[in-house]
Image (cartoon, rainbow, N blue to C red):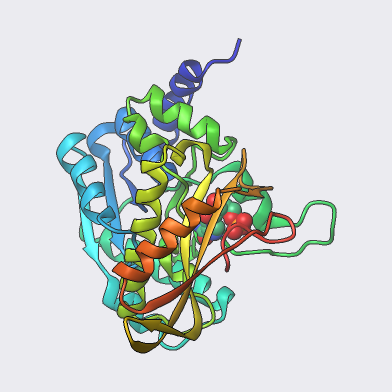
Amino acid sequence: DWTMAAFKDQEIAKIREQVGDGKVICGLSGGVDSSVVAVLLHEAIGEQLTCVFVDTGFMRMGEAEQVVTLFRDHYNIQLIHVDASEKFFTALGDEFDPEKKRKTIGGLFIDIFEEEANKVGGADFLAQGTLYPDVIESVSFTGGPSVTIKSHHNVGGLPERMNMKLVEPLRELFKDEVRDLGRELGLPDTFVDRHPFPGPGLAIRIPGQPLTPEKCDILRKADAIYLDEIRKAGLYDEIWQAFAVLLPVRTVGVMGDARTYDFVCALRAVTSTDGMTADYYHFDHEFLGRVSNRIINEVRGINRVVYDCTSKPPGTIEWE
Ligand code: XMP
Protein backbone atom coordinates (compact mmCIF):
# COMPACT_ATOMS: atom_id res chain seq x y z
CA ASP A 1 0.00 0.00 0.00
CA TRP A 2 1.87 3.01 -1.36
CA THR A 3 1.41 6.41 0.26
CA MET A 4 3.31 9.66 -0.06
CA ALA A 5 4.03 9.57 3.68
CA ALA A 6 5.68 6.19 3.25
CA PHE A 7 7.58 7.39 0.19
CA LYS A 8 8.86 10.36 2.19
CA ASP A 9 10.12 8.17 5.03
CA GLN A 10 11.70 5.78 2.58
CA GLU A 11 13.46 8.60 0.70
CA ILE A 12 14.69 10.13 3.95
CA ALA A 13 16.15 6.78 4.94
CA LYS A 14 17.76 6.40 1.50
CA ILE A 15 19.24 9.89 1.64
CA ARG A 16 20.69 9.27 5.11
CA GLU A 17 22.20 6.01 3.93
CA GLN A 18 23.63 7.51 0.74
CA VAL A 19 25.00 10.65 2.37
CA GLY A 20 26.25 9.31 5.70
CA ASP A 21 27.93 12.21 7.44
CA GLY A 22 28.86 13.87 4.14
CA LYS A 23 28.02 17.42 3.16
CA VAL A 24 25.38 18.15 0.55
CA ILE A 25 24.96 21.23 -1.55
CA CYS A 26 21.61 21.87 -3.21
CA GLY A 27 20.79 24.39 -5.89
CA LEU A 28 17.55 26.26 -5.38
CA SER A 29 16.01 27.60 -8.57
CA GLY A 30 12.89 29.14 -7.10
CA GLY A 31 10.80 26.35 -8.59
CA VAL A 32 8.76 23.69 -6.85
CA ASP A 33 11.10 20.78 -7.60
CA SER A 34 14.30 22.12 -6.13
CA SER A 35 12.34 23.50 -3.17
CA VAL A 36 10.90 20.10 -2.38
CA VAL A 37 14.36 18.55 -2.67
CA ALA A 38 15.77 21.15 -0.28
CA VAL A 39 13.10 20.65 2.38
CA LEU A 40 13.31 16.85 2.06
CA LEU A 41 17.07 16.97 2.49
CA HIS A 42 16.80 19.39 5.36
CA GLU A 43 14.49 16.96 7.11
CA ALA A 44 16.82 14.05 6.35
CA ILE A 45 20.20 15.54 7.17
CA GLY A 46 19.65 18.99 8.72
CA GLU A 47 22.83 21.01 9.03
CA GLN A 48 24.73 18.82 6.58
CA LEU A 49 22.79 20.63 3.87
CA THR A 50 23.73 23.97 2.38
CA CYS A 51 21.50 25.48 -0.27
CA VAL A 52 22.77 27.75 -2.96
CA PHE A 53 20.37 30.05 -4.68
CA VAL A 54 21.97 31.34 -7.82
CA ASP A 55 20.13 34.45 -8.88
CA THR A 56 20.68 34.36 -12.62
CA GLY A 57 18.86 37.62 -13.23
CA PHE A 58 16.30 35.51 -15.13
CA MET A 59 13.88 35.14 -12.22
CA ARG A 60 10.29 36.33 -12.18
CA MET A 61 9.10 39.44 -10.35
CA GLY A 62 9.81 39.29 -6.61
CA GLU A 63 10.94 35.67 -6.81
CA ALA A 64 14.44 36.04 -5.43
CA GLU A 65 13.14 37.73 -2.26
CA GLN A 66 10.45 35.04 -1.83
CA VAL A 67 12.99 32.23 -2.02
CA VAL A 68 15.31 33.82 0.50
CA THR A 69 12.45 34.58 2.90
CA LEU A 70 10.97 31.09 2.74
CA PHE A 71 14.15 29.10 3.10
CA ARG A 72 16.42 31.22 5.23
CA ASP A 73 13.86 32.84 7.51
CA HIS A 74 11.06 30.29 7.66
CA TYR A 75 12.89 26.97 7.35
CA ASN A 76 16.16 28.08 8.83
CA ILE A 77 18.03 26.30 6.07
CA GLN A 78 21.63 27.37 5.51
CA LEU A 79 21.30 29.41 2.35
CA ILE A 80 23.85 31.15 0.21
CA HIS A 81 22.32 33.75 -2.09
CA VAL A 82 24.57 34.52 -5.04
CA ASP A 83 23.69 37.45 -7.24
CA ALA A 84 25.23 36.20 -10.46
CA SER A 85 23.17 38.09 -13.02
CA GLU A 86 26.12 40.01 -14.41
CA LYS A 87 28.06 36.80 -14.92
CA PHE A 88 25.16 35.25 -16.81
CA PHE A 89 24.63 38.23 -19.09
CA THR A 90 28.36 38.36 -19.79
CA ALA A 91 28.60 34.63 -20.49
CA LEU A 92 25.64 34.73 -22.87
CA GLY A 93 26.87 37.78 -24.75
CA ASP A 94 24.97 38.07 -28.01
CA GLU A 95 24.12 34.38 -28.16
CA PHE A 96 20.57 33.61 -29.21
CA ASP A 97 20.75 29.97 -30.27
CA PRO A 98 18.45 28.10 -27.84
CA GLU A 99 20.68 25.08 -27.26
CA LYS A 100 23.82 27.20 -26.85
CA LYS A 101 22.00 29.42 -24.37
CA ARG A 102 20.87 26.41 -22.35
CA LYS A 103 24.36 24.92 -22.38
CA THR A 104 25.98 28.22 -21.37
CA ILE A 105 23.51 28.78 -18.55
CA GLY A 106 23.75 25.17 -17.34
CA GLY A 107 27.56 25.28 -17.46
CA LEU A 108 27.80 28.53 -15.55
CA PHE A 109 25.38 27.21 -12.96
CA ILE A 110 27.68 24.24 -12.36
CA ASP A 111 30.73 26.54 -12.16
CA ILE A 112 29.04 28.72 -9.56
CA PHE A 113 28.01 25.70 -7.53
CA GLU A 114 31.56 24.47 -7.56
CA GLU A 115 32.83 27.86 -6.44
CA GLU A 116 30.29 28.02 -3.61
CA ALA A 117 30.92 24.42 -2.61
CA ASN A 118 34.60 25.23 -2.27
CA LYS A 119 33.81 28.30 -0.18
CA VAL A 120 31.87 26.27 2.38
CA GLY A 121 34.76 23.84 2.63
CA GLY A 122 33.69 21.43 -0.08
CA ALA A 123 30.65 19.20 -0.44
CA ASP A 124 30.49 15.51 -1.20
CA PHE A 125 27.09 15.50 -2.87
CA LEU A 126 25.02 17.71 -5.10
CA ALA A 127 21.24 17.45 -4.79
CA GLN A 128 19.02 18.15 -7.79
CA GLY A 129 15.29 18.21 -8.46
CA THR A 130 15.41 16.03 -11.55
CA LEU A 131 11.97 14.60 -12.36
CA TYR A 132 11.01 11.51 -14.32
CA PRO A 133 9.90 13.47 -17.43
CA ASP A 134 13.23 15.37 -17.42
CA VAL A 135 15.05 12.07 -17.42
CA ILE A 136 13.08 10.74 -20.39
CA GLU A 137 12.97 13.91 -22.51
CA SER A 138 16.67 14.55 -22.19
CA VAL A 139 17.49 11.03 -23.29
CA SER A 140 15.37 10.42 -26.33
CA PHE A 141 12.18 11.24 -28.11
CA THR A 142 9.77 8.42 -27.36
CA GLY A 143 9.41 6.02 -30.25
CA GLY A 144 11.97 7.70 -32.46
CA PRO A 145 15.73 7.67 -32.80
CA SER A 146 17.72 9.15 -29.94
CA VAL A 147 17.24 12.88 -30.39
CA THR A 148 17.76 15.51 -27.73
CA ILE A 149 14.79 17.87 -27.76
CA LYS A 150 16.10 20.27 -25.15
CA SER A 151 19.03 19.90 -22.84
CA HIS A 152 17.38 20.62 -19.52
CA HIS A 153 19.98 22.39 -17.56
CA ASN A 154 19.50 20.32 -14.41
CA VAL A 155 20.12 16.99 -16.12
CA GLY A 156 23.15 15.37 -17.61
CA GLY A 157 25.44 14.59 -14.71
CA LEU A 158 28.31 16.59 -13.43
CA PRO A 159 31.74 17.17 -14.81
CA GLU A 160 34.22 14.68 -13.41
CA ARG A 161 36.34 17.47 -11.97
CA MET A 162 33.63 18.38 -9.48
CA ASN A 163 34.11 15.11 -7.69
CA MET A 164 30.59 15.18 -6.21
CA LYS A 165 27.97 12.49 -6.32
CA LEU A 166 24.38 13.22 -7.26
CA VAL A 167 21.41 13.01 -4.94
CA GLU A 168 18.20 13.02 -7.01
CA PRO A 169 15.30 11.93 -4.81
CA LEU A 170 12.60 12.98 -7.32
CA ARG A 171 13.92 10.97 -10.26
CA GLU A 172 10.97 8.58 -10.21
CA LEU A 173 8.24 11.17 -9.67
CA PHE A 174 5.90 13.13 -11.88
CA LYS A 175 5.06 16.73 -11.10
CA ASP A 176 1.77 16.06 -9.29
CA GLU A 177 3.58 13.58 -7.06
CA VAL A 178 6.27 16.13 -6.29
CA ARG A 179 3.53 18.53 -5.19
CA ASP A 180 2.02 15.85 -2.93
CA LEU A 181 5.45 15.24 -1.45
CA GLY A 182 5.86 18.99 -0.89
CA ARG A 183 2.57 19.12 1.00
CA GLU A 184 3.58 16.04 2.98
CA LEU A 185 6.71 18.00 3.97
CA GLY A 186 4.61 20.95 5.13
CA LEU A 187 5.35 23.38 2.30
CA PRO A 188 2.48 25.88 1.95
CA ASP A 189 -0.10 25.17 -0.79
CA THR A 190 0.51 28.57 -2.37
CA PHE A 191 4.10 27.53 -2.88
CA VAL A 192 3.58 23.90 -3.83
CA ASP A 193 0.86 24.70 -6.37
CA ARG A 194 2.97 27.23 -8.20
CA HIS A 195 3.37 26.69 -11.91
CA PRO A 196 6.58 25.00 -13.02
CA PHE A 197 9.43 27.34 -13.87
CA PRO A 198 12.39 26.21 -15.96
CA GLY A 199 15.93 26.46 -14.61
CA PRO A 200 17.09 28.84 -17.37
CA GLY A 201 14.13 31.05 -16.45
CA LEU A 202 13.26 34.12 -18.46
CA ALA A 203 16.35 33.56 -20.63
CA ILE A 204 14.42 30.98 -22.66
CA ARG A 205 11.40 33.27 -22.89
CA ILE A 206 13.22 35.96 -24.85
CA PRO A 207 13.81 33.99 -28.05
CA GLY A 208 15.76 34.90 -31.14
CA GLN A 209 17.61 37.92 -29.76
CA PRO A 210 20.51 38.77 -27.50
CA LEU A 211 19.46 39.03 -23.85
CA THR A 212 19.72 42.30 -22.00
CA PRO A 213 18.71 43.32 -18.46
CA GLU A 214 16.27 45.81 -20.03
CA LYS A 215 14.49 43.07 -22.00
CA CYS A 216 14.30 40.91 -18.90
CA ASP A 217 12.69 43.82 -17.03
CA ILE A 218 10.11 44.35 -19.75
CA LEU A 219 9.25 40.65 -19.77
CA ARG A 220 9.13 40.46 -15.96
CA LYS A 221 6.56 43.24 -15.84
CA ALA A 222 4.35 41.76 -18.55
CA ASP A 223 4.56 38.31 -16.97
CA ALA A 224 3.58 39.68 -13.54
CA ILE A 225 0.50 41.43 -14.96
CA TYR A 226 -0.57 38.30 -16.82
CA LEU A 227 -0.28 36.13 -13.72
CA ASP A 228 -1.98 38.73 -11.57
CA GLU A 229 -5.00 38.68 -13.89
CA ILE A 230 -5.00 34.87 -13.97
CA ARG A 231 -5.06 34.76 -10.17
CA LYS A 232 -7.78 37.42 -9.96
CA ALA A 233 -9.92 35.43 -12.39
CA GLY A 234 -9.49 32.33 -10.21
CA LEU A 235 -7.86 30.41 -13.05
CA TYR A 236 -4.38 29.82 -11.64
CA ASP A 237 -4.95 26.28 -10.39
CA GLU A 238 -6.69 25.17 -13.59
CA ILE A 239 -3.65 26.03 -15.63
CA TRP A 240 -0.48 23.95 -15.67
CA GLN A 241 1.73 26.83 -16.70
CA ALA A 242 1.21 30.38 -17.91
CA PHE A 243 3.84 32.92 -18.86
CA ALA A 244 4.71 35.75 -21.18
CA VAL A 245 7.30 35.59 -23.96
CA LEU A 246 9.06 38.64 -25.39
CA LEU A 247 9.34 38.34 -29.16
CA PRO A 248 12.23 39.80 -31.19
CA VAL A 249 9.77 41.67 -33.38
CA ARG A 250 8.84 45.33 -33.19
CA THR A 251 5.60 46.54 -34.67
CA VAL A 252 3.98 49.89 -35.22
CA GLY A 253 1.28 51.12 -32.89
CA VAL A 254 -0.40 54.30 -31.74
CA MET A 255 -0.50 55.67 -28.22
CA GLY A 256 -2.49 58.89 -27.72
CA ASP A 257 -1.65 60.71 -30.91
CA ALA A 258 1.90 59.41 -31.18
CA ARG A 259 3.31 56.57 -33.23
CA THR A 260 4.99 53.76 -31.28
CA TYR A 261 7.43 51.13 -32.50
CA ASP A 262 7.76 48.51 -29.78
CA PHE A 263 8.05 44.81 -29.07
CA VAL A 264 5.40 42.10 -29.31
CA CYS A 265 4.58 40.03 -26.25
CA ALA A 266 3.16 36.53 -26.65
CA LEU A 267 1.08 34.95 -23.90
CA ARG A 268 1.24 31.22 -23.28
CA ALA A 269 -1.00 29.08 -21.09
CA VAL A 270 -1.42 25.32 -21.16
CA THR A 271 -3.15 22.53 -19.31
CA SER A 272 -1.21 19.33 -18.75
CA THR A 273 -0.77 16.56 -16.22
CA ASP A 274 2.95 15.94 -16.57
CA GLY A 275 4.37 18.49 -19.01
CA MET A 276 4.98 15.80 -21.63
CA THR A 277 1.87 16.71 -23.61
CA ALA A 278 -0.21 19.86 -23.24
CA ASP A 279 -3.26 21.66 -24.62
CA TYR A 280 -3.37 25.39 -25.01
CA TYR A 281 -5.74 27.01 -22.54
CA HIS A 282 -9.04 28.39 -23.85
CA PHE A 283 -9.34 31.80 -22.21
CA ASP A 284 -12.40 33.83 -22.99
CA HIS A 285 -11.73 36.81 -25.19
CA GLU A 286 -12.66 39.41 -22.56
CA PHE A 287 -9.94 38.03 -20.35
CA LEU A 288 -7.34 38.18 -23.11
CA GLY A 289 -8.41 41.71 -24.01
CA ARG A 290 -8.08 42.83 -20.40
CA VAL A 291 -4.57 41.39 -20.06
CA SER A 292 -3.53 42.84 -23.38
CA ASN A 293 -4.75 46.32 -22.40
CA ARG A 294 -3.00 46.25 -19.07
CA ILE A 295 0.30 45.07 -20.52
CA ILE A 296 0.30 47.66 -23.28
CA ASN A 297 -0.72 50.47 -20.91
CA GLU A 298 1.57 49.53 -18.03
CA VAL A 299 4.69 48.14 -19.68
CA ARG A 300 6.80 50.53 -21.65
CA GLY A 301 8.42 48.69 -24.56
CA ILE A 302 5.45 46.50 -25.54
CA ASN A 303 2.70 47.74 -27.86
CA ARG A 304 1.15 44.48 -29.08
CA VAL A 305 0.05 41.26 -27.41
CA VAL A 306 -0.72 37.93 -29.11
CA TYR A 307 -1.95 34.60 -27.74
CA ASP A 308 -0.21 31.31 -28.48
CA CYS A 309 -2.75 28.58 -29.36
CA THR A 310 -0.26 25.77 -30.00
CA SER A 311 -0.58 22.48 -28.16
CA LYS A 312 2.25 20.02 -27.35
CA PRO A 313 2.96 18.26 -29.59
CA PRO A 314 3.68 19.77 -32.06
CA GLY A 315 4.85 22.78 -30.00
CA THR A 316 6.79 22.50 -26.77
CA ILE A 317 5.50 24.39 -23.74
CA GLU A 318 8.42 26.82 -23.66
CA TRP A 319 9.37 28.64 -26.83
CA GLU A 320 13.00 27.50 -26.61
P1 XMP B 1 8.92 21.87 -22.84
O1 XMP B 1 9.20 23.28 -23.24
O2 XMP B 1 10.04 20.93 -23.15
O3 XMP B 1 8.80 21.90 -21.27
O4 XMP B 1 7.60 21.37 -23.37
C1 XMP B 1 8.27 20.87 -20.48
C2 XMP B 1 8.33 21.34 -19.05
O5 XMP B 1 9.70 21.42 -18.62
C3 XMP B 1 10.02 22.75 -18.23
N1 XMP B 1 11.39 23.02 -18.67
C4 XMP B 1 12.47 22.99 -17.89
N2 XMP B 1 12.61 22.75 -16.57
N3 XMP B 1 14.95 23.06 -16.74
C5 XMP B 1 13.84 22.80 -16.00
O6 XMP B 1 13.97 22.61 -14.80
C6 XMP B 1 14.90 23.31 -18.07
O7 XMP B 1 15.92 23.54 -18.71
C7 XMP B 1 13.59 23.27 -18.67
N4 XMP B 1 13.14 23.45 -19.93
C8 XMP B 1 11.80 23.30 -19.91
C9 XMP B 1 8.98 23.62 -18.90
O8 XMP B 1 8.82 24.86 -18.22
C10 XMP B 1 7.76 22.73 -18.85
O9 XMP B 1 7.15 22.78 -17.56
User: In the shown orientation, is residue 311 left or right of residue 205?
Assistant: right
Count of numbered marks: 0
Quarter of the image where ligand 1 sits = bottom right
Q: In the rendered image, is residue 121 in sight?
A: no
Is residue 257 shown above or below 178?
below
The structure residue drawn at horizontal position 45% and vertical position 64%, both measured from the top left corner, is: 200
Question: Looking at the image, which is closer to me, 264 or 254?
Answer: 254
The structure residue drawn at horizontal position 34% and vertical position 72%, both measured from the top left corner, is: 218
Question: Looking at the image, which is closer to me, 282 or 164?
Answer: 282
Instruction: Where is residue 72? Give x, y as percent.
Output: 18, 43
Question: Looking at the image, which is closer to me, 91 or 296?
Answer: 296
Instruction: Where is residue 219? Give x, y as percent.
Output: 38, 69
The structure residue drawn at horizontal position 26% and vertical position 48%, both measured from the top left corner, is: 67
Instruction: Where is residue 265? Give x, y as percent.
Output: 47, 71
- In the rendered image, the quadrant that contains the C terminus is bottom right
Q: Residue furthest front?
A: 257
- In the rendered image, the quadrant that contains the N terminus is top right
